[in-house]
Amino acid sequence: MSRLIRTELYKFIKQRKNQLILEGLALFFIGVIVYYSYQEMNYDRATQKSMQMEYDNASGIQQSLSMYKASLEKANTEQKERMLKSHPRINEEFDFWDQEKITSFQLVYYYKNHKVKGEKYRKEIEIKKYENLLIGAKSKFISKENLKAKGEAPAELQRQITLDKYLIKHNIKIGNNPYHLTGINFLYLMLKGYIPMILLGLVTLLCIDIFIGEMEEGSYKLYLTQPFARGKIFISKIISAGITSVGVVTVLLFISFCITSIMNGVGDIHYPETIAENKMLYSLVTISNSIGNVKIVSIGTYLVMGYSLFFVLLIATVMMTMFISVITDSTSVTIGVITGLILLSFVFSSFLDEKTSLHGYYFLGYINIYNILNAQINAPLLLGILLNGIIVILLFLISCYTYQRKDLLGGVS
């Protein structure tokens, strides 16, 4: 078995395609470091600009409401009834936009004047702003879709409020830039957004021709006439795929962690971070009424849970790739199916309501690791790990049986 595994690994390393993909993966990690370094440099200016736009928007809406209120006071009874249908709670709506204008202006001042009032002041203003936005979303003064487009979905606002209050209450030193690339923060940022999805896609390309390559080259007949049972050949290929996929990502993560640690320090592994409450985190069924409920843990605990889920997803995706390639013997079909499955998770996260149970029962829906860990969609962590683990076992057994029974040499093995 060890000889077969060494052979598979040697073939993997020697293939020009795989060398190019490995180079692409390395460039991707470098690109992530460069991108977040750029974001760090421009964070203050970009945030000030964003707050200025929100201030201008709130001022404009408040001015319109002020004119509307003036018209309402002059209107007769019939006109008032008609006008109040479009703004039944106009005074509350006016107060909401007034608070939004005030807090946005305070944050503009903060970033414009070189943070003279300190990070605690910023967090206090942010808490007021986020709590006001939650009131606005609940009262439908501002749409949830609009908030989500700005990265301020209600669940994310509640998460940030919980974290900010904890930092202030316990007098913890507050970081002034979320993109500051310490080693720990780099690992944290690698679990956010679409980065896990891109990583899965690139790693899939590494493993896609472990079975198909020999079929397309025609070398499979020579390989299968060697004195090895097909079952052992299959297992050696699966182990090789696992070693290459998990190993490559682990090595690149470690190297990038070392680089960012040298640049900006390791960071504090005990720094507070939010994570879903136990009820949501360890459930085996979806729980829509627990969305947005988070607790405080150390960022080290967060990373352990996040990367546990990521590597389970990675193994499940590799196993799905192996399964499709064994069934179809086609590179194009395998790439198409895997790409479709990965993109489907993007579609679900973008267009499905966060409370729908479909998030929790689609195995690649767990690719949105940040949202999973922070209870922002209806998908418990433990359910995701169990679901993907079952898929790995089932696909392994089906693929192994199919590979052993397949007529590759003109007769059944």
Image (cartoon, rainbow, N blue to C red):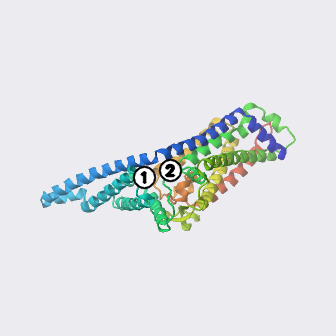
- Asked if residue 156 shows in the view, the reply is yes
Where is residue 120 drawn, in percent x and y? Answer: 44, 61
Work out how far the residue at label 1 is from the one at label 2, CA to CA, in angstroms: 14 Å
- Residue annotated with mark 1: 148
142 on left or right of 246 = left
Element type where label 2 sits in the image: helix
Where is residue 214 drawn, in percent x and y? Answer: 75, 35
Q: Nearer the viewer, residue 202 or 56?
A: 56
261 on left or right of 231 = left
Q: Residue at x 50, y 52 (%)?
A: 178
Image quadrant where residue 215 sits: top right
Mark in the foreground, 1 or 2: 1
Mark 2 Cα-neighbour bin, 10 Å: few <14, some 14–19, many ≥20: some
Q: Is residue 380 above or below residue 111?
A: below
Q: Residue furthest right?
A: 227
Where is residue 207 drawn, in percent x and y? Answer: 69, 41
State the quadrant of the C terminus. top right
Q: Residue at x 71, y 32 (%)?
A: 16
Element type where label 1 sits in the image: helix
- Residue annotated with mark 2: 348
182 on left or right of 291 = right
Q: Amino acid at mark 1?
A: Lys
Q: Residue furthest front?
A: 116
